[in-house]
Image (cartoon, coloured by chain):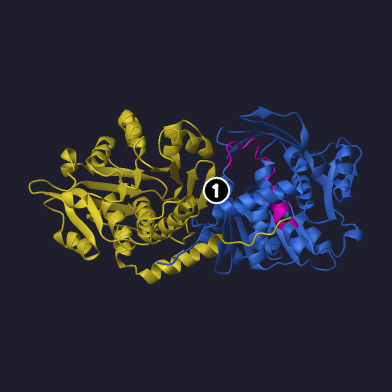
Chain colours: A yellow, B blue
Amino acid sequence: MAFDAIETPFGKTDKIIGGSATYVAYCASNFVQPVQQVSIVGYDFPKEVLQDLQSKGVQTEGVEIIKDKKSFFWAGKYHMDMNSRDTLVTDLNVLADFNPVIPESYQGAEFLMLGNLVPAIQKSVIQQLKTRPKLIVLDTMNFWMESALDDLKEVLTMVDVLLVNDAEARQLSGELSLVKAAKKIMAMGPKYIIIKKGEHGALLFHNDQIFFAPALPLEDVFDPTGAGDTFAGGFIGHLAKTKDISFENMKTAIIVGSAMASYCVEKFGTERLREITKEDIDKRLAQFRELVNFDIELV
Amino acid sequence: MAFDAIETPFGKTDKIIGGSATYVAYCASNFVQPVQQVSIVGYDFPKEVLQDLQSKGVQTEGVEIIKDKKSFFWAGKYHMDMNSRDTLVTDLNVLADFNPVIPESYQGAEFLMLGNLVPAIQKSVIQQLKTRPKLIVLDTMNFWMESALDDLKEVLTMVDVLLVNDAEARQLSGELSLVKAAKKIMAMGPKYIIIKKGEHGALLFHNDQIFFAPALPLEDVFDPTGAGDTFAGGFIGHLAKTKDISFENMKTAIIVGSAMASYCVEKFGTERLREITKEDIDKRLAQFRELVNFDIELV
């Protein structure tokens, strides 16, 4: 949970609320409650946001508040195509000494979503859970492949689903073909790989099965920040709601994640995500069905 | 109809059979017969290929054979990612004076596929048809947007479906967003726009409707040459077979085109396309259904 300052071709924000865990929680709470949040913030993080999350069924006992430090802050600027961005500022602040302690009340959680962070911290969270969750989903990024590859590889052996983008899948596997990349990564531990391709959708791999979910073609992508975290929140939110971790249900979960991400990018930061209703979600899920549904006729 | 010499990271060919019309005909003849071919070749084009096409229901009365000139020849080399290529040789040869005359026996054709070529020639073919076909599909490329834009714009007012890739759609419309690009291009004439995104699939636009078809995730793309033409052949082949030009049936036609293109890239040139059976096609269509099919549950 953090602050972001974002510049896109459509505008610019001052410090606004951001952070992977914030997006995941806002998104997942539409599908399952409680969401048990683990994070760290500084004295400057607004209490109203924590209260807003609580009102949506997000427990914040696991959110540590450091009285004499500031929250993590990131500033970035997106290029015209919205697919790439420059980081302008990264102030670690409280994140520099983050050593999460899982509250006793969180024990027994069946679904664990590990946001993108130092692999050693992700590992520590898994190890603190006395009962192994039914499903562990891991997000990571290229930075950890370069700076903490051994730790990352160890965590990979402990999780069920890995979320990466296409460039990261290629980097981690050394394979250009995403099909080959997914096979190599599955051999490293996770039985399911989700490869996110931004505006080109997402692929789910499991053994020899492949599922593809498109991104909704939008007239404007206003701000892509948090789209990947929102996708993750929708994915695990749907699985936790249905308690069904079959490949078939993961297909639906990926469509739910894609639908939620398509809302996220319509406004800056978490704004759109905080205002959408269940009716909005249903409407977009129906759009996805229209987008990919076809009648097959054999030759 | 032409010769190609192709180099990919997987190997290299001598002169082999190529050309948009060749791929379209080999592909479409799986779905509808006769296919009435219009093209031009030189004395060096093998009679066996014309006979092979005839055996598959392709009429070649409209294929002009120039006795003292060579066939069009293109040589190119694909880069490692297979998404970009360098042209090494372009010998126009017979194509320099191509001025197709539509045989009387072709009159009354209900479906017209105009392969990528000089817009003025595409226009001449449309004008020679005494009865306007039920559906005219136009392929084009960035080269004509730069060298013959006025002619291209005129042809756009005469056709129903435009096939372009994402970069070409952006160039023609001046819009970065493909949704906005499609709207602008529809205002230029064609009521349907298909935007091909290579390994990222294809989008079909019509009024406010959008359909998305993925490309099949493949371990190896051996040779992408002709994939777009094969896609076009499968698209119009399915429509001509079913004689149904509704948006719903175009969805299926795009899946058929994608399935055929996924076979095309498995071997050099037309090789794979010439050997596949109806069973192969059905098998791949079923894979496409698995790839995108999901059960929707509303929130």
Q: In x, y percent, where is residue A51?
A: 17, 63
Residue at 69% in and 62% down: B154
**Residue A115 is one of the magenta-drawn residues:** no
Residue at 54% in and 62% down: A291
Q: State the image quarter where residue B109 is shown.
A: bottom right
Residue labelled with disc 1: B200
Q: Which contiguous range is marked in magenta?
A: B218-237
Describe residue A132's horizontal placement relative to residue B252 as left or right: left
Q: In x, y percent, where is residue A41?
A: 16, 49
Q: Chain of mark 1?
A: B
Residue A3's place in the image compared with B47, above or below, is below
Residue A166's place in the image compared with A105, above or below, is above
Helix, strand or loop at label 1? It is: helix
Q: Is residue A128 visible?
A: yes
Which residue is at the front of the view, B209 or B67?
B209
Q: In x, y percent, where is residue B88?
A: 67, 32
